Image (spheres, rainbow, N blue to C red):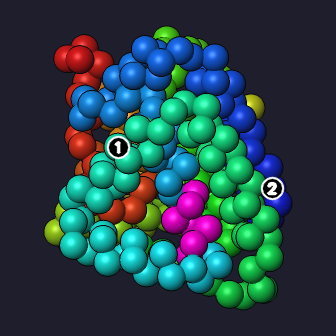
């Protein structure tokens, strides 16, 4: 069984890895564009730091979390971008220090949540372990954006299991957020970890299946790759459609990734 401490340890490693890539950058490199929408390296780190701060406010019941909820309701398509831009405007050294301190405070606060208590969030309330898992997923995804823009080779590790887990658990949400009706069909998911282990979800006798690389499924679930460009395979029409809409993160539908050949 995965514990909160297990997840927080993986989150620390993912965060430190990204920090090692961005800390040596000069101002021009911090302005490197990382996404089609124009987010820079600074936006990526700023977004992670801001989300840690929002998570800490939620865990500690700080009134600022309620204000954030109001801002999200008033500007559902832009409040995340606005926050990223605000944090990206900070000097790089200041941004890094705030991100480093913020994620340490969040880890401490998550460990202090009473047993059985849920943490409020922009979506459904979450357990501390689920919130930490979501932070791993976000850090993993945004690290890939930064690494690809800087031409850094991303090591494949079993930490992507956290991303895969959320991607599978949020299958119903992927339909809901797109105004589609989820089919009443179970899907068995069997993914091969970078270590060679096999991770499974869903009934073994389910009528439809998803198999392949865990790392690649995580790229799909974070909307970083098109289904044609990954080693992930579906058996059954519902499983195949799910791979086109799978989404591990909360909020509105993510952009449909372009095929690598079309980029």
Q: Residue at x 80, y 70 (%)?
A: 111
Q: Looking at the rendering, which quadrant does residue 15 occupy?
A: top right
Which residue was labeled with disc 2?
Answer: 6
Q: Which residues, given as a range, are shown in magenta?
A: 52-58
Crowdedness of circle 2 by 10 Å Cα count: few (<14), some, many (20+)?
Answer: few
Select label 2 or label 1 by which is in front: 1
Q: Within the magenta stretch, is there residue 144?
A: no
Q: Residue at x 43, y 64 (%)?
A: 170
Which residue was labeled with disc 1?
Answer: 85
Q: Residue at x 56, y 39 (%)?
A: 95
Compared with 91, 222 (above or below) is below
Instruction: Identify which residue, 99 or 202, lies in the foreground.
Output: 99
Instruction: Identify which residue, 136 or 186, lies in the foreground.
Output: 136
Dot 2 or dot 1: first in sequence order is 2
Q: Looking at the rendering, which quadrant does residue 19 occupy?
A: top right
Please say whether residue 109 is visible from this viewpoint: yes
Q: Residue at x 21, y 66 (%)?
A: 75
Residue 82 appears at what percent x and percent y?
Answer: 30, 51
Residue 102, disc: none
Residue 128 appears at what percent x and percent y?
Answer: 68, 72
Residue 138 appears at what percent x and percent y?
Answer: 52, 48
Secondary structure under the numbered disc 1 in the rendered image: helix
């Amino acid at each position: 069984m995965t514990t909160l401490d297990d997840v927080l340890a993986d989150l620390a490693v993912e965060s430190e890895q990204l920090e090692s890539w961005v800390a040596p950058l000069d101002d021009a490199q911090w302005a490197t564009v990382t996404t089609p929408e124009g987010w820079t390296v600074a936006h990526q780190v700023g977004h992670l730091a801001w989300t840690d701060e929002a998570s800490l406010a939620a865990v500690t019941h700080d009134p600022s979390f309620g204000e954030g909820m109001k801002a999200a309701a008033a500007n559902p398509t832009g409040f995340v971008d606005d926050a990223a831009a605000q944090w990206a405007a900070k000097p790089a050294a200041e941004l890094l220090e705030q991100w480093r301190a913020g994620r340490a405070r969040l880890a401490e606060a998550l460990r202090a949540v009473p047993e059985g208590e849920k943490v409020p969030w922009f979506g459904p309330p979450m357990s501390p372990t689920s919130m930490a898992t979501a932070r791993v997923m976000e850090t993993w995804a945004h690290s890939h954006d930064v690494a690809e823009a800087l031409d850094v080779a991303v090591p494949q590790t079993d930490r992507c299991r956290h991303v895969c887990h959320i991607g599978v658990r949020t299958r119903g949400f992927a339909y809901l957020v797109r105004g589609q009706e989820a089919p009443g069909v179970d899907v068995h998911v069997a993914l091969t970890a970078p270590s060679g282990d096999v991770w499974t979800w869903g009934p073994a006798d389910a009528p439809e299946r998803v198999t392949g690389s865990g790392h690649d499924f995580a790229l799909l679930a974070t909307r970083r790759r098109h289904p044609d460009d990954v080693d992930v395979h579906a058996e059954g029409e519902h499983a195949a459609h799910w791979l086109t809409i799978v989404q591990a993160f909360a909020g509105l539908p993510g952009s449909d990734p372009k095929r690598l050949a079309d980029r």
